[in-house]
Image (spheres, grey):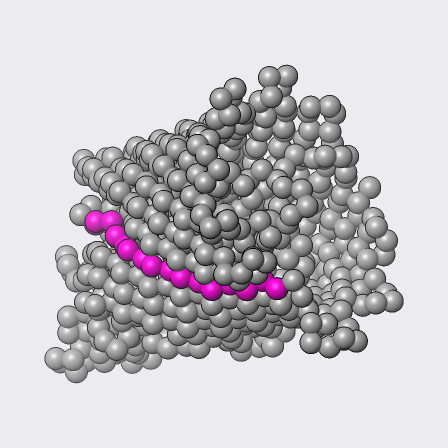
Amino acid sequence: MQFPTSSVITLILCNVIAVSAYAQSGDAKVQAKPAQPQQVEVKGKSQEEFARTETASRSIVSNVELTRFGDNNIVDAMKRVPGVQVTNNKLHLLGMAPGYTQILIDGEAPRGITIEDIPLNMIERVEIYRGANAQFSSQAMGGTINIILKKAASNKQHSIKASVGHMFQNNGGVDWFHSDKNGNLSHTVSVSLSKDRMSAGQAEDSTTNFVNENVLTGAKSEFQNVSRSQRSDEILRISPRIQYKTASNINLTSTSIVAHNRFNSDTTSQFNNVAGRVFEIGKTASHDTNRGTNFGSTLKAVTTLENQIGVDVTAGFQSQNFASRSRSQNYLPDGSLKFNRDLNTDVEVLVGITNGKLSIPTNAEHDLVIGWSGWRADVDIENNQTDRFASNSTSIVRPYGASSVMDNVAFFAQDDWKFKKNSSVSLGLRWESQGIRTENNDGDKVKNRASVLSPVVQTMWQLDPQNTERIRLGVSRTFKAPEGTQLLMPKIYVINNSIESPNIVGNPNLRPELSWSVDAAFEHNGKDGLNYAVRAKAQSIDDIHREAVYFADNAYWKKFVNAGSAQSQSIELSTQFPLKRWMDKAPDMDFSASYSHFWSNVKDSATPYNTLAPYKYVMTFGANYRAKDIPLTAGISAKIQDSHWQQISLTERQYLKTPKNVDIYALWKFDKQSQLRFALNNVLGGDAYDSMTYASVGNSRSQSFRAVPTARNVSMTYEYKF
């Protein structure tokens, strides 16, 4: 807020890099493909039906569900899925903050790219694992969201989709999809071009009011920060996938994603003094430009040897280049120019990956899988800040450069044992080691490694011969390694340093978080379409990461520290059913509903606000209607959650006002080739997204109130297949 937009983006980007190669929301790890040998398609069974017979509990979100409301990326589409939350454009499972949920693409971490780079028409389904799985990374304290891409084409198909929308500003995009097959060779390619889709979702104006008081002297200050921005962005994504079956029965699949984005922003921040302290800078006007190119490619080989051992091996690389430029003018309260600031950041990332697994036949009761994963990332960051003062020719230059090598290696074994016909138990063990070596141009060095042995035990008991009811139970050990920028990062010097806006620094002594969790579930899937489930989870976490603000060298600073232990418990109730289940002559309507409740506490954090999430409960409701005589499908989705104070760091607590969210859509199919989709998200709209923050450092106390406008999001999408 008090420092240039590009500084924020730089920090976020560094997080993405270290996380993409080290541990982000779901954290970077190369995994063997999704769990279980059931990745082979079974004709006559849907993935939802197949998941019911597996030991590991997973929920399936189909492509039809993802595209129902006309969303343009998976982040927007997933926000309506029960149990899933979106915070600052990051997916995570309810009950824990972003960064604790593992995000995978075909079982592998999305290094060098973001999941928004994946066109929705290339996604077959999304799998949600609330517990751990030995075949995935152990960095899944909050669970795993695994995005499964579509298999190679079985026939020729073309489609083009054009969309337009408006939220805070107009936006639009064009998507082209092509697939074909020729003998043993098949391919798909998707090209997506969008304009202002990111910027349309960001409010142009925000206002924050502050009150700062020294409890010893009684000195009190009041001031206001008013920010206004104009943003624009363009994104181009190309995603080819090629599959070939050799004469020796080896299936080769090449998957690549290239994305290029450009972002521009003009922002004005006005600091208005009301009483007490007068900030040195009264106004900042900045122009930010960001350019980034991401490219990733993997080659996967799958075959079965003569002894019936299944082999699944993947190798690939990821590359990312990012350049951020910020030019700002900083004015004194009287309107005269104080200094100009240039902030330039260049980042290059290169990642090599490999993983594989062997499916070893034993007997009818056992399926044994052993495998490995590994990756290495080289990251180079150049961050240069220059302040040129108007009153004289002096300049302050703060150059920062750092080179990092990050690596991960893991080995796992998993034995799926079937007993009593349809019940099973899965015994898994995963050893994972992850490290980072970093040195910056000041000579600071960091070596940090976390190694964890993670047992995973899961069992599933079918309660009736029809396999309509089952009980699941799982116990697992997971961890969350420190992110690269939490350990060592360029010092961020902000404008108008204060308790509300401190400088930022890394902590090379940060230890990983470790967790034990127990999860249980009862599921019912009736042949009459009535489905319901009860899920519960209890978790214990040691060395939890929290931010702390402190005063040193005549300035306020912020860094991550280990803040003791935490416990959490949750329960989730969900149901889906057709209306005809209850009324014989009812219209063709499907309903879904869920309720989730959470209890948590961070032991060494201030009470009574020491929770892991800013909410206690979340309710969702959905309804879909298919007209009988006209080609119309329509639906509604709603989400309600409470709000309460939360201790978000060792020195700050925050209250977020979460508005009720209602979305509607309508789909008209003109014929088998063309359709028009209309979506209106945030129907209630209007209310500002408010937050209140209370901070305490030493003798200083600070209160702030921030109001960010919200808006309805309307979009129309036309799709034509040929």
| Residue 44 appears in the rendering | yes
User: Residue at point 34% right, 67% down?
Assistant: 569
Residue 335: give x, y in percent of width and height.
39, 66
Q: Which residues are magenta?
A: 510-526
- Residue 710 lies in what quarter of the image? bottom right
Residue shown at 13% from the left, 80% from the top? 217
Vertical relation: 9 (above or below) 586: above
Q: Is residue 205 left or right of residue 143?
A: right
Residue 109: percent from left, percent from top: 44, 41
Residue displayed at 63% across by 23% down? 245
> In the depicted view, which residue is nearer to us: 238 or 491?
238
Q: Farthest top residue?
A: 247
Q: Nearer the viewer, residue 606 or 632?
A: 632
Q: Principal SS element in the magenta part?
A: strand
For this orientation, the residue located farthest to the left is 216
Q: Is residue 515 magenta?
A: yes
Residue at x 85% of width, y 56% of height: 670
